[in-house]
Amino acid sequence: MVIVAVVVDLAWPPFNTFPLLASVSVIAAPMFSLPWTIASGAVACLTGWLLSFRENAEVLSRTNVIGFATLVTLTVVAAFLNRMFAREREQLRTSRQVAEAVQRAMLPTVPERVRGLAMADRYQAAQEEALIGGDLYAVHETPHGLRMVIGDVRGKGTQAVSLVNTLLGVFHAAALQLPDLPSVVQAAETQVRDLNAREEDSPFEDFVTAVFVEILPDRSAFRMANRGHPTPLLVHAGEVTVLEPEEPSLPLGLGDLAGPLVAVDRFDLPPGATLVLFTDGIVEARDRVGAFFDPVPPLTCPLPPEPGAVLDAMLTALFRHTDALEDDAAALAVTRLPDEDASQQTSAAVRP
């Protein structure tokens, strides 16, 4: 704006450039620090004085005095605005940090190793808002195998947090006590529908998209029930398999529309393979032209047989694809260790 004022003054001397210079500090206030905002006002005043001096006009004329007074006044106002903007940005940053900390505190810690399996998790809060999201995941080792869930509650805020907390509690109890995966899914379905029945003031029914997984005790295969959630991936030897269910199912909370049966699919889990589960914050991320992120290409290459490395490769490609997430993103990965690694891990675990 200073350059524009100088160019206009040189091209058309009768034009009063003080209004252009007066806007300099106001424009700088929300963009730069306090010293830079004050410095921009000082540069505008110095530029106005030099332009007045160049025209051989009386520097302290009435017009110039009013113009300089306006520049000084707006610089002071811009300094106050700069402090207000900085305070608001700091409050927003703090609220985002608190929201992410609360979200992480609700999610249980995923063990790194469990009897022949390696696991990793990642959680990334949305960059455009400070609200607590509804992403959830949990892992439980049970006599029936390793049971996992990953899901996303519709909406955000305290209501989503309440539903996440309730679902995690139901999953922990059902995973340990119920004998099969459909029973676990049905317990979660019943809980969500019960909460919907209590929320009389809610204009919409709450629902949860989720994937339930049960890895068999011998780790050779796993069962999966997908309730309207983004399709998991199986990464093995540089190839990615999209684990589409044979029959699509509605999200939790809407099961009364489709009947009581729970569709369960079975997939093999060869040694070195990694099962990748994620929420829709990943697949719904858009680039500048509006294209959605596809997690398959970045995983279709030789990767270390470690779940953390697989998730890091996917998230690195995600942040190359988009500048900011529109929704929270959670990911969970489990790798079947090679048989020799699993044997060494078991021996180390039983050694006195």
Image (cartoon, rainbow, N blue to C red):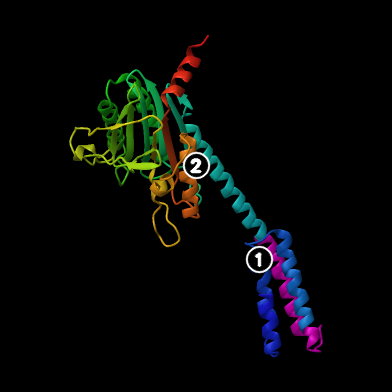
Residue 248 coordinates in the image, percent (x, y): 23, 42
Query: In the image, is residue 67 part of the stretch drawn in magenta?
Result: yes
Q: Which of 272 and 125 lies nearest the eye of the viewer?
A: 272
Residue 66 coordinates in the image, percent (x, y): 74, 79
Residue 221 coordinates in the image, percent (x, y): 31, 28
**What is the tally of numbered marks visible in this picture?**
2
- N-terminal of the pair, mark 1 or mark 2, is 1
Q: Tell me which residue sits at (26%, 29%) in the image.
A: 186
* Quadrant in which the N terminus is drawn: bottom right
Q: Secondary structure at mark 2?
A: helix
- Residue tagged 1: 28
Q: Within 10 Å of the Cα at label 2, are there few (<14), some (14-19), or many (20+) other Cα atoms?
A: some
Check disc 1 and give the amino acid type.
Ala
Q: Which of 73 and 260 lies nearest the eye of the viewer?
A: 260
Query: In the image, is residue 127 part of the stretch drawn in magenta?
Result: no
Q: Tell me which residue sits at (45%, 30%) in the image.
A: 119
Residue 304 coordinates in the image, percent (x, y): 48, 37
- Residue tagged 2: 312
For residue 143, the mark is none
The segment highlighted magenta reads: 52-81
